[in-house]
Image: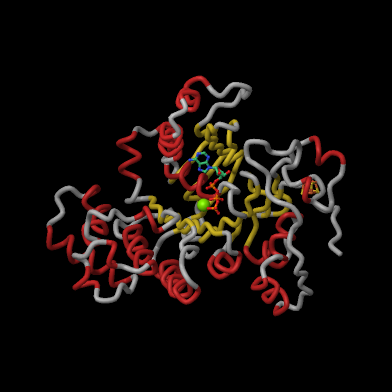
Amino acid sequence: MAKGDPLLILKNLKAYYPSKKGLVRAVDDVSLEVREGECVGILGESGSGKSSMALAIMGLFERVARFSAGASNDPELRRAFEKGLPGSKDMPGVGGSVIFRGKDMSTLSQEELVAIRGRELSLIPQGLGHALNPQHSIGHQTAEPLVVHEENIRLLTLKRKVLEYLGLVQLADANLRFVMDPGSFSGGESQRILIAMALIAGPYMVIADEPTSALDVTVQAQIMNVLRMVRDEFDVSLLLISHDAGVVAEMADRVAIMYAGKIVEFASAVAAFHEPQHPYTMGLMSSFPTIAMMQMRAGKKPRLRGIPGDPPDLCNIPKGCAFHPRCQYTIDICKEEIPEYREVKPDHFIRCHRYGDIVQE
Ligand SMILES: Nc1ncnc2c1ncn2[C@@H]1O[C@H](COP(=O)(O)OP(=O)(O)OP(=O)(O)O)[C@@H](O)[C@H]1O
Ligand code: SF4
Ligand SMILES: [Mg+2]
């Protein structure tokens, strides 16, 4: 595959959880493409479905959703995967397709998926708390993706590789500390270790889910440096998930904006940050001071206004365009029909009935 070829293609991806309140439509009809060598940012408010999308891409969504349903001890939720939830014709689980390097992931066996995960496609999960196993040394855990995929790897080679990758992410004193367990490392150091784990087997693509959000500001800047190094020096595509527009603006070539489980705009970073076309993107960008500064530097008049109201409950998404109760441009059709996701210019996708007809004040 050459730089620019499609590496990951999502087609009408859906990922629904069962819950006591009904079906949670966490990812709903998402279509997206990540190309060889690029960084695509996924930006959206908390609860818009970003992590669920990452889990669905990794082939882990069903397992997590079933685990939560099982843990709830509610027999109806446990049965929901086989019989559905009362009052809903849609089933929990994953629908649509995830095509990675030309392979439809839904047609692969568990063994084939395990062979891909970690080696070809890896995830830096959200939330440092549960990501590292407190029972094993960080050296052991960093080595794991290699051990899983290369059974006969020699111990010395393994140690050399672990130290090489912990060094690349600039973990201080890695050669002395790789035998320690995760409890001995700070949040920023744990994030460095997770990045090393995601890279060690040489994947084609890394999904980083909120890699800076659990950290304080100075540590965030250090992790951003590591991610920039990954983007610039590794031959890897990145899907960078964040609710912080500043993080995405610094890294991404293209940006997808997610609202209530759907992508509402997908465009080059320049277009998304400087000339957003979807009313939600306009509002979202206007709520970030860092983006306002960026727009000012580009000679534009920033509008710091934000978006009134709250995102919807994903068990009870408003009819028509999910954004209509908060949108200042709503017309009748917005309350009735879900807008189509369409390519309005080359590489610029929008989900809005009024594209081309909105004049920003
Ligand atoms: N295991 C689960 N069972 C049921 N519902 C879930 C589960 N995990 C997440 N959800 C719901 O799915 C929706 C999307 O959640 P998700 O974690 O994907 O959003 P997010 O965009 O990653 O949010 P954040 O920015 O806070 O990480 C939310 O309504 C959330 O409550
Ligand atoms: S479809 Fe209508 S409600 Fe939705 S964003 Fe566009 S103008 Fe606003
Ligand atoms: Mg998340």
**Percent position of residue 144, x then y:** 24, 53
Left or right placement of residue 91 versus residue 306 in this view: left
Left or right placement of residue 205 versus residue 53 in this view: left
Whether 333 is drawn above or below 134: the answer is: above
Which is more toward the observer, 219 or 300? 219
**Percent position of residue 147, x then y:** 21, 51
Q: Residue at x 77, y 50 (%)?
A: 326
Can I make out residue 340 in this image? yes
Give residue 188's quadrant in the image.
Answer: bottom left
Residue farthest to the front? Answer: 73
Whether 164 is drawn above or below 198: the answer is: below
Q: Residue at x 59, y 43 (%)?
A: 31
Q: Residue at x 56, y 39 (%)?
A: 11
In the rendered view of the protein, which quadrant contains the C terminus?
bottom right
Q: Residue at x 45, y 33 (%)?
A: 72
Give residue 186's quadrant in the image.
Answer: bottom left
Report the label total: 0
**Percent position of residue 343, x then y:** 70, 48
Can I make out residue 104 in this image? no
